Structures are given as structure tokens and as C-alpha cells.
Image (cartoon, helix red, strand yellow):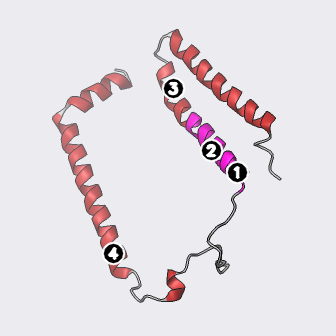
Amino acid sequence: KTAYEIGVRLVGSEMCIRDRAIAAIVGFVGMAIMFGASYLLSPKKKSALKDMSYECGIPPSPYTWSQLNMRYYIFAILFLIFDVEAVFLFPWALVFINSVDAVFYEMLLFIGILLFGIIYSWKKGALQWN
């Protein structure tokens, strides 16, 4: 039997539903215990030092406005885009084994669009770190 057939059998059975319900209950009870322990064990005394924002050990400046270089934002967005690409490639590799040829060409189109995006950002200089 293939993994797909075994999975179809397990998803429809009552035992699978019962196991999922038990796992959900254990998960919620575990979260409640962790939140309760965090509340009971956390320090309760308020002070001005604790209410101050933490910026890498440096006391924050009195100015509330700061300028952010857009290069950091663009770099982070590009990282997220290609990180999501990797997340899509792993399930696709599993499905690709038992699928039609169109799936392969769809993924080539997806990778081509992402490749165009990385080349475009490289040409614009968004990936240069100064």
C-alpha cells in the first residue's frame, strides 16, 4: 500500500478523530499550564527601569522619530520571499513523484518568476550591503 492510501484510511477513521481530539486537549492544557506558570513565576514589582524599552543595552534616546534605511526593509522582504519559495518546494517535491507533467512546468514557471525577481533586485542594487 502507498502512503497516500494509508493516509486516506487514517483520516476518515474514528480513531484518528479521537487521537486528534486528545492531542488538541493535551496541547491546550499544556499551554494553560505554561501561561499559569509564567504568571506565577514572573516578577511583579513595577519600576521605571522595567518599563523602559530595551535597545541592545543602550539607554533609548529621547527622540521618538528615527529614520530607517529602506535597504534593510527590502532585504528582509526578499529574504521572506525566497524563504517562502523553499517552503513551497518541499511539498511539491513529494507531490511531483506521482503527478502529471504539467506540475513540473508549473513549478518551472514559479521558479522562473522568482529568478526574475532576484535578478531584478540584484540589478537594482537591493542586495548590496554597504
Mark 3 and mark 1 lie on one chain; the one further toward the N terminus is 1
Q: In this view, does 113 lie to the left or right of 16?
A: right
From mark 4 to mark 2, how far is it between C-alphas? Answer: 36 Å
Q: In which quarter of the image is the N terminus?
A: top left
User: Which of the two discs, 3 and 1, sits closer to the camera?
Assistant: 1
Residue 124 found in image quarter: top right
Task: Check disc 3 and report its element: helix, strand or loop.
Answer: helix
Task: From the image, tell me which residue sits under label 2.
Answer: 77
Say which mark, if any, is on residue 70.
1
Q: In this view, does 33 lie to the left or right of 67?
A: left
Instruction: Say if mark 2 contacts mark 3, CB within 8 Å.
Output: no
**Does the magenta stretch mainly form a helix, a strand or a loop?**
helix
Q: Which percent across, then down, holds residue 129?
A: 80, 50
Residue 91, compared with residue 39, is above or below; it is above
Residue at x 53%, y 32% (from the top left corner):
88
Label 2 and label 3: CA atoms lie apart by 23 Å
77 inside magenta stretch:
yes
| Relative image position of residue 75 (x, y in whole percent) | 69, 46
Asked if residue 71 is positioned above or below residue 88 in the image, the reply reads: below
> What's the amino acid at mark 4?
Ala
Disc 4 marks which residue? Answer: 37
